[in-house]
Image (tube, helix red, strand yellow):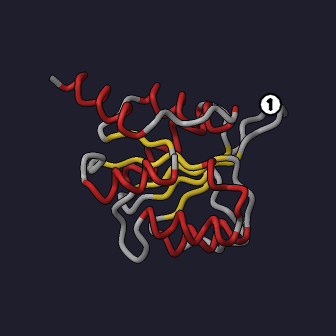
């Protein structure tokens, strides 16, 4: 496990423009690695955590411009991590992009709707992930949860 004071960022590209730091949180190590490569390819500095407790330590120790977080994880679920993270750093409340295969679950849906947070339903495209992260960085408000679920459901039919 990486020290919370020493983020495990993907290699910083050689070009010297301003880079945004993103934390990817998921217990699926292969998915975290894949997301890390995808986001690093977009010139983001990417740190990773494999559960909510590890992520919380990193949020307390480091500044992130965006957080990509799974909902179902051991130790702390995504919603528990979210609430504890914003207690520690209230300014990060709108910096989250949740990823989940359970967007239609009542508890998950209510969490998204009540907290007005952005989410992607698994499986999602690389472009949707990049767009969601860029929207968070630009301060674009998330779409309403019910509309997002309705649009996602139509695409599957």
Q: Is residue 46 visible?
A: no
In this rendering, position of residue 63 left or right of residue 74 = right
Quadrant of the drawing holding the C terminus: top left
Q: Is residue 16 visible?
A: yes
To which residue does mark 1 refer?
Answer: 15
Residue drawn at the location 43% of the way across and 48% of the way down: 113
Q: Residue 31 placed where, x, y %?
A: 38, 49
Q: Is residue 75 above or below residue 46?
A: below
Query: Label 1 crowding class (10 Å Cα cut-off): few <14, some 14-19, many 20+?
Result: few
In the picture, residue 5 is in which quadrant?
A: bottom right
Residue drawn at the location 46% of the way across and 70% of the way down: 80
Q: Residue at the front extreme?
A: 114
Q: Residue 32 placed where, x, y %?
A: 44, 52
In this rendering, position of residue 7 left or right of residue 109 = right
Residue drawn at the location 51% of the way across and 47% of the way down: 117
Q: Residue 143 placed where, x, y %?
A: 49, 33
Q: Residue 100 placed where, x, y %?
A: 34, 49
Q: Is residue 82 above or below residue 148?
A: below
In this orientation, which residue lies closer to the viewer: 41 or 115? 115
Count of numbered labels shown in the rendering: 1
Quadrant of the drawing holding the N terminus: bottom right
Residue drawn at the location 63% of the way across and 55% of the way down: 93
In this orientation, which residue lies closer to the viewer: 111 or 69? 111
Q: Is residue 120 above or below residue 7?
A: above
Q: In what element is the residue under mark 1? A: loop
In this orientation, which residue lies closer to the viewer: 30 or 23? 23
């Amino acid at each position: 496990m990486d020290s919370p004071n020493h983020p495990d960022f993907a290699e910083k590209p050689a070009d010297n423009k301003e880079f945004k730091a993103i934390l990817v949180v998921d217990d699926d190590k292969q998915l975290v690695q894949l997301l890390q490569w995808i986001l690093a390819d977009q010139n983001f500095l990417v740190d990773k955590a494999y559960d909510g407790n590890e992520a919380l330590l990193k949020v307390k120790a480091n500044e992130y411009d965006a957080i990509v977080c799974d909902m179902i994880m051991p130790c702390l679920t995504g919603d528990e991590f979210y609430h504890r993270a914003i207690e520690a750093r209230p300014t990060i409340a709108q910096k989250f992009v949740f990823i989940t295969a359970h967007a239609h679950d009542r508890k998950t849906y209510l969490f998204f709707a009540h907290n007005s947070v952005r989410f992607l339903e698994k499986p999602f495209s690389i472009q949707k992930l990049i767009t969601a992260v860029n929207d968070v960085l630009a301060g674009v408000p998330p779409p309403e949860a019910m509309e997002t679920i309705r649009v996602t459901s139509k695409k599957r039919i």
